[in-house]
Image: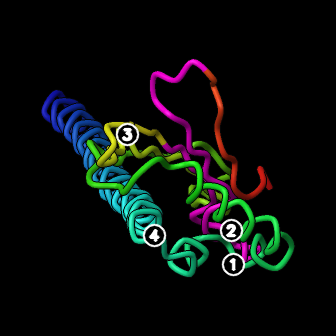
Amino acid sequence: MRKKVTITITLILVSIFLLACTDKNKSKTSEIESEKETKLDNEEINNIGLEIYEGLKNKDKDRIEAVFSENQMLKHHRKIDKGIDEAFEFIDGEIVDYKSIYGGGAGGKVRNYEWIEKFYDGYIDLIQTDTGKEYMINYGGCLIDDKDSDNIGIFYFEISEKDSDSNESIFVGTYN
């Protein structure tokens, strides 16, 4: 009898231990997948920033318009087109370099542990021109929208001069 009780208690303890390990493994796997997803999202956000930067540097309106969401371009094409022209005029001199491009998730909606909407903000820091002026750009948009894929892309970008007394900026797009 004593032997049966000891074996039963041992089996229960081993089962509890194995179940605890399984949860840790699931948790670790979930964390690793989340880190990979975040890394991919950040890479995509940085690539979008690079397209905006290259478009401004080369005065390539089509390149900049290509990163806007389809819905933004359909609803606000004239406004975006005019805003890009204003951004070209706002920049004093030729763009020569930038310090960094970075960004991350800004929120959204999750259903059954999966993103159904995911928004982001990005930044292009210290864009330098040949005249010595420096500019900063912030931009935002949508990475995931399971109801309307035409929302995927940027909604806006805003460029401002660093260390300017005027606080002037050019806003291109809408806040959706």
**Contact, mark 2 vs mark 1 (Cβ under 8 Å):** yes
Q: Quadrant of the C terminus?
A: bottom right
Q: Nearer the viewer, residue 60 or 137?
A: 60
Residue bearing the label numbered 4: 55
SS at mark 3 in the image:
strand
Q: CA distance from mark 2 to mark 3?
A: 28 Å
Magenta segment, which residues? 137-165
SS at mark 1 in the image:
helix
Q: Residue at x 45, y 29 (%)?
A: 162
Q: Residues within 10 Å of mark 4 (few under 14, many from 20)?
A: some
**Comes first in the chain, label 4 or label 1:** 4
Is any part of residue 115 visible from this angle? yes
- Classify residue 57 by image quadrant: bottom left
> Please, what is the three-letter code of the amino acid marked with disc 1?
Ser
Q: CA distance from mark 3 to mark 1?
A: 29 Å
Is any part of residue 119 visible from this angle? no
Residue bearing the label numbered 3: 125
> Please, what is the three-letter code of the amino acid marked with disc 2?
Asp
Furthest residue toward right: 75
Residue bearing the label numbered 1: 149
**Comes first in the chain, label 3 or label 1:** 3
Residue bearing the label numbered 2: 145
